[in-house]
Image: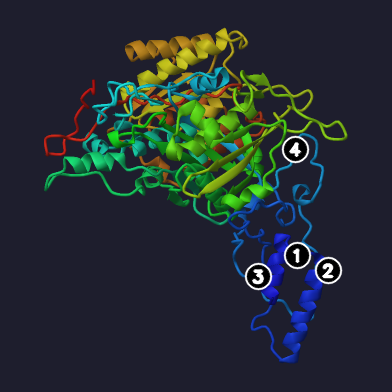
Amino acid sequence: MDEREILTRFKAGTLGRDDAARLLTGARQARTDTRTRPETAPRPTEPYARPPAAPSGALSTQPPVQPPAATPAERYAQPSVRPDADPPPVPLDAEPSAPPPGPWYAEPGAVPPPGRPAVEDRYAVVGIAGRYPLAPDLHAHWENLRTGRDTSRAVPVTRPGLAPAPPGRRGHFLDDVAGFDPEFFGITPAEGALTDPQERLFLEVAWEALESAGCTGSRLDALTTPGGPPRALGVFVGVSSHDYALLAAASWTDGRPAPAAGHGGLPGRLASALELTGPARAVDTAECSALTALHLAVGALRREECAAAVVGGVELLLHPSRIREGAGEGVGAVVLKPLLRALDDGDRVHAVIRDTADGRTAGTRTHRRADGAHETRESTARRIGWAGAATGIAALTAAVLQVRHGVLAPGDGRGAAAPWPRTCDDTGRELPRTATVEIAADGGCAARAVVEEHPAAEAPAGEEPGGDDGPFLLSAPTPAHLAATARRFADWLAGAADAGHPAGALPAGLARALRAGRAALPCRLALPASDAPGVIAALRRFADTGSAGDEARTADLRGGADPMDLGGLPQTRDYLTALWRAGHREQVTRLWLDGVDVDWAALEAASPGTAPAEQPPSEPPPSVHLRRPLWLSTDGAGAPREPEPTG
């Protein structure tokens, strides 16, 4: 081995210190004997690189080598060094040195400070969304998992393209797969009709996951890698079927438009719509596709190719040749961040990805905990059918939901849901709940992940949640979308009050989360974030009449925004900050209604005395998609049409 390989193995933890020193001495002696010298001088200021990612089929157990402790701002401002870059040349008289001192979380066996969990090389699930059989959202899906509901049924009569279905055949189907909301994403109906429904459905669910993570507004711009551009969000999606293209080919004639070939549009459409700068990958490893995508996303985060990542999978049954007994469908997505960054950003952490692996030999390093959930292809098939490329994301979602709720779903020898108590180590300390996800496809592919509970953060003693005198903001692409979203939030807030939330108060952190975490779309509504009954009444009045009262303000910027082009002036940010710090919330809100780009998170961060940001006790609902049926044209002109019922 030459010096570079020795150093690489030492940093990766696969070569001990004594062996590394002995091998380096031998390598240098050989170089001296042949009178060779390094061509370049060492670079003592080179930032420490993280160790290379574990090779395919292996799970890393060594903590990464980290630079000296830095503040979050300093950490993300440092230039990036890729882990697969060649190490700098070593002078002949240099002695092997120990890894540089790192922060507490880089020390093997280190005990974290109070309130700070271990975070080394772990990745937080900060957003999650999905649609599964008989479950339009994850609340309904969790109820199905918890109760062990049978989601199989006959082929829906409204499903286009599947007639005639074999009599008596049952499967696990999604509702309304022909529906789509092209206006929400700035797509024409004709283009939407030519777009694979798998791509359309993933686009909607990925958006919901990003809203769950609070990453569709100004916080999306703040996602940067060290020295890199903003919006460094990667997209990794598992997909394998081409049913829509098969349906189009069956009726294609010369000159007639057809759906695009391949699956590059699934991650590419989202990346293009949001102007993302991270990698975008479609992955096909059969049932393992989504877990393989997860493994690739973790590797990209580890190499700092992106600051966060959307990971998902989708499977729809659109061609009659694939309607087999027990076949299933589903679509899901999660948003990942390095755990350290998620904690520093104040994100809601649903669970932690502790390890991932790709390949059949990887399971030798993944040990199933006796007390933990164990999700497989078979357990997933019992719940949502044999769901192809959606199997991995469905299994991962089931693991995250069980870990988050502290309840083991029926299956794996359990006839009913059961409480999931934490186990303790030899000292009596409680250990986090841990689930394993292992998917092995018939074709030879396999992938695995270990999902761990994240302990809820405890507020420091004596600290009370701060009030919020900023505005309550909603926005949408059209007035109809805005009215529907206002009604959804009114119903959600009323339900929160019925569930025991303190009477009269808005959920803590809600208005802040909406301002900083949601995209500013053309049609806008601003309300005083005073009390829950007042906000609920104003939202319902707006949904019914288009007016929310004297204190509410609305704007429709579809014809143009920011008429004075204030957003293009370098002084505007300082001006907004000065207004906000002086308490002129109304003026800042009016500028936002005029279309000025307001970074709400930056305003609050620059204001002394502002209470720390906190997540609402429960996750706010997603924006409304006004879906309508769009399907392949039958007139040869490429015009969209509503699908014909099959029964």
Answer with left or right where residue 286 lies relative to residue 64: left
Amino acid type, label 3: Pro
Q: Quadrant of residue 102?
A: bottom right
Amino acid type, label 4: Arg
Disc with the residue nearer the chain's start (4 vs 3):
3
Disc with the residue nearer the chain's start (3 vs 2):
2
Q: Which mark is residue 15?
A: 1
Looking at the rendered image, the disc whose residue lies closer to the viewer, 3 or 1, is 1
Instruction: Tell me residue 583's x, y (percent).
Output: 57, 27
Residue identified by numbered label 2 = 18
Looking at the rendered image, the disc whose residue lies closer to the viewer, 3 or 2, is 2
Answer with left or right where residue 154 lies relative to residue 460: left
**Secondary structure of residue under mark 1:** loop
- What residue do we see at 56% from left, 46% from top? 447
Q: How much space separates mark 4 and mark 2, taking CA atoms?
A: 33 Å
Q: How much space separates mark 3 and mark 2, taking CA atoms?
A: 20 Å
Amino acid type, label 2: Asp
Q: How much space separates mark 1 and mark 4, taking CA atoms?
A: 30 Å
Q: Which mark is residue 87?
A: 3
Instruction: Tell me residue 101's x, y (percent).
Output: 79, 57
Q: Quadrant of residue 182?
A: top left
